[in-house]
Structure formats: C-alpha cells, structure tokens
Amino acid sequence: MYERGISSAVIKRLPRYYRYLGELLEKDVIRISSKELSVKMNVTASQIRQDLNNFGGFGQQGYGYNVEYLYTEIGRILGLDRQNHVIIIGAGNLGQALANYADFERRGFVVCAIFDVNPEVIGKDIRGIVVRSMEDLQSFIAENKVDIAAITVPRQNAAKVAADLVQYGIKAIWNFAPTDLHLPPEVVSENVHLAESLMRLSYKLKNASEDLSEAERGDGD
Amino acid sequence: MYERGISSAVIKRLPRYYRYLGELLEKDVIRISSKELSVKMNVTASQIRQDLNNFGGFGQQGYGYNVEYLYTEIGRILGLDRQNHVIIIGAGNLGQALANYADFERRGFVVCAIFDVNPEVIGKDIRGIVVRSMEDLQSFIAENKVDIAAITVPRQNAAKVAADLVQYGIKAIWNFAPTDLHLPPEVVSENVHLAESLMRLSYKLKNASEDLSEAERGDGD
DNA sequence: TAGATTGTTAATCGATTAACAATC
DNA sequence: TAGATTGTTAATCGATTAACAATC
C-alpha cells in the first residue's frame, strides 16, 4: 500500500474514477468489472486495471471490483478520509464563490477562514465565515491547523501572497491566479487557470468545423 | 497555416506560451530564443520548437523569435483575434464570479447574458448584465450571436441544460458542473472540475513527505 | 563570413493497449 | 468444475528529447 513515483497521468484520472464509483454507489450497484466501467467512462479496461494496480489489488478474479470498497480505497488514496482545513486568500468574486461552495465539505475540505486586504470586504460574513484582514494571516496560520491555502488574488499580488504563505508554513497551495508560482520543493500546488481553459475551448471551437476527429471529445483538466 | 490533428498535449501548452509571451511583451522584450524561453518556462527548447512548428515556422535561424509576432500568431491560433460571445447558465456564486471576471474581455470573450431558474436572482444586475429567466434562453440564442455557453448549474441539472443548449444550436460548452456531459461530435467542450483539482492537491499533500520527487512541480489544469 | 539558432529528422522514453496466465 | 475477470507481462503507440543540417 506504499505509493511511490506514481505517474501524474494516473493521479489525474483518480478523481474521475472516484466520481464514477460514487455515482454507482448512489445507484446501489454492488460490483462492477473493469470492462463495464470502461464502457461507462469511455476508457479501456486495461487502463483501469493498470491504474488501480499501482496502488494494490482491489479486485477479485472472476468477480470484478466491489464498488463500495473500491470507492473507499480511492478516497483513502486521495486523502479524502481526513479533514483538510482550507483558507482562502482573496475575497473577490472567485474567493467568495469557493467559500460558498459547500459541496467541498462533503469531501472533507473545510473552509475555515478568508482573508483580504480590502477594508470594504473585511468583516463581511460568508456562510458564517467572516472575512479577515491580511494582517491577521500569519497569526491565524500559527494558531490554527491550516492544510491548504487557495489563492484568488489578482495576478500581480499572487507571488507575494505565495511567498508569505510558504514562510508561514503552508504546504499546499491551490492557485487560481493566472501565473506560475515559484515554490520550494516541499510545497505542493495545483493550478486552476480558467483563462487557459477558455482559450483551449476557443481553439477547439475555431477548429471544430475543419477537424471533427480530435476536438470533439470534450476533455477536461 | 492549415492546422490538422494537432495533439491535445500541444494544445494544452499553447495558452501558457501565450501567457509568457504576453509578459515578455509587457516588459518590452523584442526577441527571444527557444533556449531562453525554455529556461523561463521550465520546459525543453526542443519542445517549444516542436510545438510551434506544428503551426508554422515563426522563428528565424540565428535570431530566435520576435516576441510580438509570435504572441500575435499564437493568439490567432487560439482564436483570440475574434470576439467570442459567452452566455452563462446558472447565476450562483460561480456563475456570478465568472460574469464579474472582466479580465476575460481582454482576450475577446464577452459575457452577453446570464440565465437562472431562481426567481430571486432573475433581474439582478451583474456588471451591467441582467440575470434572465431560463425561459428566455432559446429565444435569446436565436436572436443573438452566442458562441460559448458556460454551465455553472448544479450537477443534477447539467445534462438537461447541455441537451437544451445543443438543441438551441450552441457549439461550445464550458462545463463547471462535476459531471461528464454527453455531447454530439460537432459540439466542443472544456471541463473545469474544481473538486478534482482539489482532490489531486490533497493527494500530493498527503504524499509530499514520502515522495518529494514527483509531486513538487505544481502542475496545472 | 562566422556564430547563433531555427526547423526537422532520428532516438529515446513513457504511457497506453493487448494478451494471457493466474485464480476466484 | 467451468466461466469470468483480474493482475501483470509484453507489444504498441505517441510524446518528448537529442542531434544536426539548413540558413539567417
């Protein structure tokens, strides 16, 4: 069960497996074979088995996979069996949207604070969470368990915010600013670059008429 | 200049080139070699040259690339030289955040309408755009040029909304609902699955201490 | 011209798919 | 037991990197 050097292609797919298994679970499906799942997900059965076997043998020959068991195990692999405390830096539209998105809590992600520099939003209440001043960031991190910081500040301020967060001890950054953060190796990050996603969509749209073969399969992240 | 069957790995990287070139342009940099750019972007020079040469020879031997020219050309490839009219379906937090994000307009994406089923938000004014009833969706699309529809409705409603949009003639969908839409081949899409991004971050965080080699390079989209 | 750097072909590497023996 | 389906090894495919001749 000791995971090492799993390829990032595999890790990218795990949440999607998790999502499909969750849906099957909701439908009270007990077992599923890699073949059945591959049809639903539009991938090869081979890929599913290869991916899962990076983490262990979760199936049973002649039977397939127990949906609930596999769902739980992938959740565990993704770290969803623990609570992750999230702070949001930047209480603009996107920051507020994230704070309001209660659905994350179902997966163990708890937004515990929001920070901003703008006096006009400091003090504002978002789903019971009061927007704090950036001046309180350091002390808050020191005094509370914070696992993940989401950066939703303008591009120009992102590098400085990231540097501060690192200095205050944050180990995981969810970056929404349209820039590449330069982080020390022990700090992990995920980028959500909305503008880039929109540009790719624009590319596909522009080329859709010419080239129907590739672009069609709407592809994600 | 006729693009065909470009690999999606290449297309994913184009907006990032565009971003870096834009920053160079802001700094009044005139020319750059693939080697210099590769250092800045932390990729290989070979990859940059290979990627660009899918679309044509934009450089000059012994000189490198003219920043402004290359920026313009990549913009053209991505379809940023035209206006794309965007509607947003779902005026919740995320939909409103997107509508408020004026930065997209700089790239030619104009939000021209927002729709919702909730009477409480219908009529609300967001940056000069009034939230409309979903009942007006069909007629609006018929009477206006709409290129892209962003779906920011709850998961349960996404499939129906997508089917309606397709029926009304929409050819590009920017999907934020945590589900895979089933679309006809002539309709292109891009998914932004925030929950999946957050799960990957959780995975990296959990494995960061054990495995410092892979996870460190915060990887995007 | 000499030096630099592209465009492009060839080599390598990694990821996906196919095949099948193991086994429930 | 016979049938089904996994786990895993081998084959294929595609993407990345290296090398270098072309050329500005």
Image (spheres, coloured by chain):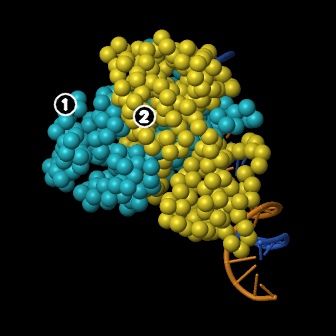
Chain colours: A cyan, B yellow, C orange, D blue
> Would residue A118 appear left or right of A7 to someone viewing this image?
left
What's the distance in space between the residues labelled 2 and 1, CA to CA? 23 Å
| Chain under callout 2 | B
The 10 Å Cα crowd at callout 2, few under 14, some 14 to 19, many 20 or more, is: many
Q: Amino acid at mark 1?
A: Gly
Residue at screen point 61% across, 60% down: B68
Q: Which residue is mark 1?
A: A128
Helix, strand, or loop for circle 2? helix
The 10 Å Cα crowd at callout 1, few under 14, some 14 to 19, many 20 or more, is: few
> Would residue A99 appear left or right of A220 to someone viewing this image?
left
Q: Position of residue A164 (x, y in %)?
A: 28, 58
Mark yes or no: residue A158 visible. yes
Q: Which residue is mark 2?
A: B98
In the figure, residue B144 lies in which quadrant?
top right
Which quadrant would the N terminus of chain A be assigned to in this image? top left
> Would residue A40 appear left or right of B150 to someone viewing this image?
right
Q: Is residue A156 above or below residue B185?
A: below
Q: Amino acid at mark 2?
A: Leu
The label nearer to you, 2 versus 1, is 2
Residue at screen point 30% across, 30% down: A100
Helix, strand, or loop for circle 1? loop
| Chain under callout 1 | A
Q: Position of residue B184 (x, y in %)?
A: 66, 22
